[in-house]
Image (spheres, coloured by chain):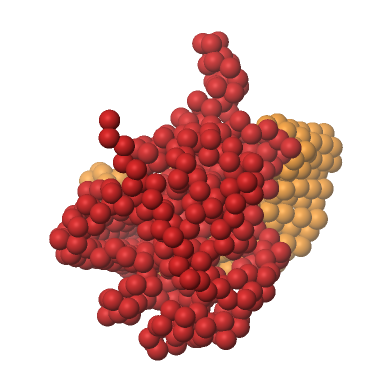
Chain colours: A red, B orange
Amino acid sequence: MDIDISKYDFKSPEQGFRLPKGLSEKTVREISAEKGEPEWMLEKRLEAYKLFLKIPMPKFGPDLSKLDFDDITYYIRASERKMRKWEDVPPHIKEAFDKLGVPEAERKFLAGVEAMFESEAVYQGLKKEWAEKGIIFTDTDTAVREYPEILKKHFGTIVPAGDNKFAALNTAVWSGGSFLHIPENVKLEIPLQAYFRMNARAFGQFERTMIICEQGSKVHYLEGCTAPIYSEASLHAAVVEAIAKKNSHLRYSTMQNWSANIYNLVTKRAFAYENSIVEWIDGNIGSGVNMKYPAVYLKGKGARAEFLSVAYAGKNQYQDAGARAIHEAPNTTSVINSKNIAKNGGITSFRGTVRFSENAIDARSSVKCDALLLDNISTNITRPLLATSQERSSIYHEAKVGKVSDEQIFYLMSRGLSENEAVSLIIMGFVDSFVKELPFEYAVEFNRLIQYELEKKVG
Amino acid sequence: MKMEMLEAKGSRSEISNSAIKIPAGSSAQLLFIYENEEKENRISMEKNSSLQVFSIFRGGSKINNSFSLGENSRLEIQDIFYGNVKVENSIPMEDKGCSLNLMAKGAIRANESSSYLAFASIGKNAPGASVNLEEHAFLLGKGAKANLLPGLEIRNNEVVARHASSVSELDKEQIFYLMSRGLSEKEAEEEIISGFLSRELARMKNIFGCERA
């Protein structure tokens, strides 16, 4: 049997650059200068920095008072991330890799032992195929240099710098992220994967991702990974901007499993134009504090948004996730389906908004947000807001919160399963609709991950 | 023990920015009818008490209610709202075995705006608690606006909790059916709305012997 050893090849680190901790106008200028950016991008960064200083911290959700903006390094060249020794990686991270069956080379990247991981052999072929179709898939820094017209036209139009404090911060100090442009009528059946599977530079603390689907195009973009990503940085503040033009179809799958010391405060938003479809498949497993509310603004008639999300909160975790469907055009539809699981004192929160403007004639929306509490020290919060200004429209919402049914556990145990196995099976059933939508390898890892998390004991 | 009926209406309000206590073991029924009023009510229920609250919120009202539920107490809220109203119910449930059943229904006419928010939180020391929150509204004309939020916060897993909400226009098929039976469009709409509110109105009529809606 042939073994593809190129999968385990790593690029050697280049000469590096790292800014001192803390944020000032000088930091912003230095980041831009280091990247050799054009003037327009520096201006956007400086403008955003001023907004960042003005905009207050969010007044809702988890406590962010321990977040110290002066104790953060805002820029490290991707190739210069500080490499630690494998021996220094915490045992619980290593254990998670074992349980999930993460390949050796991926483990090292995820734990910050290796700087880059690229499955060259697999992706070289795909890269060629994409290029022939005119697809641009690169990191956003490269896009600033090579595709300035497309980037400049859309940058900050979907998530303006003034949207919230962390969007302003990201705009001021962003680095890395993916840039994806799908030309008209190009349909891509194989998912595009960011992060370590494809593009190490997409992985970053303040990544900025932009996806543009031209008319009639179709793409499935995947970011993140099920295995835990270990980082010493305390804050991850990404911005994702996506545009689905007329008759296009964008599926955006994201799996977040940062280590528990991270504040994951991200803004993800898509504009959906006439008869387009935007699907948001969102898994939130990691990070200590997570605030993420993917949004779709339905701007063209007949546009459709679907949200399918799972959040798991264990010990010392606060998953404040949700979804926002903003209907601004006639005959638009949205479906929100959220599943939350809390254990070992974790907090899960669903913060959903469905809003119909006066133009949303005959718009329809359905919201379902169920939650499971696996013990009596965990918390679930559900805040589904339905707001409409259009009388010819309808929104329906329903949800239930509870524990795993004793009757179901008893039934499975009477069929020979242990209590743990029975609970795992019921939970796998609870999140089944989500797992089915993941690509095969993600689904396998996700199943293992949930089982691994469930095995963890309190304390 | 059955408490006397407490009633508040218009400016003749007997219960203004009130604090009402439902004593242990008692059962009570309250009827509130609000029009152009701003109020804050604090209602506390002691152990083993039960309370049925019926409210009609008419235009111009801004009402803030907080209910606290004692051990094994049972609270049932049936609200009807229409016109420009803003209702906020905060319902902390900190004792074991308490239960809440809230049903709010609204019919919002053209150029009117109703906002109905309810937030129930079940504490760590309330095993056996149960919650059902439902908020439904019909939009009856151009410019009608609705904001509904049935919020839940749950801090232990020995609970039964569900919530549901909906906002929609009147079903055109139902209107068409009634019109084909000889009703005018307006009559058909009225018929559907009275059907939508019939359960709540009938219960109010049974208990209070009055027809106020």
Which of the two residues, B108 or A224, is positioned nearer the viewer here? A224
Which residue is pictured at 58% across the width and 76% down the height? A19
The picture places residue B201, in percent across and down from the top left corner, at 54, 45
Which residue is pictured at 58% across the width and 17% down the height? A418
The picture places residue A310, in percent across and down from the top left corner, at 48, 44
Which residue is pictured at 51% across the width and 27% down the height? A426
The picture places residue B35, in percent across and down from the top left corner, at 61, 64
Residue A423 appearing in the image: yes
Which of the two residues, A187 or A159, is positioned nearer the viewer here? A187
Name the residue furthest right.
B24
The picture places residue A33, in percent across and down from the top left corner, at 46, 84
Residue A301 appearing in the image: no
User: Viewed as shown, does residue A414 lie left or right of A198?
Assistant: right
Q: Is residue A90 above or below residue A423?
A: below
Q: Is residue A17 above or below residue B137?
A: below
Is the C terminus of chain A in the top left, top right, bottom left or bottom right quadrant?
A: top right
User: Viewed as shown, does residue A364 lie left or right of A125?
Assistant: right
Which of the two residues, B104 or A63, is positioned nearer the viewer here? A63
Q: Quadrant of residue B45?
A: top right
Is the N terminus of chain A in the top left, top right, bottom left or bottom right quadrant?
A: top left
Which residue is pictured at 34% across the width and 37% down the height? A440
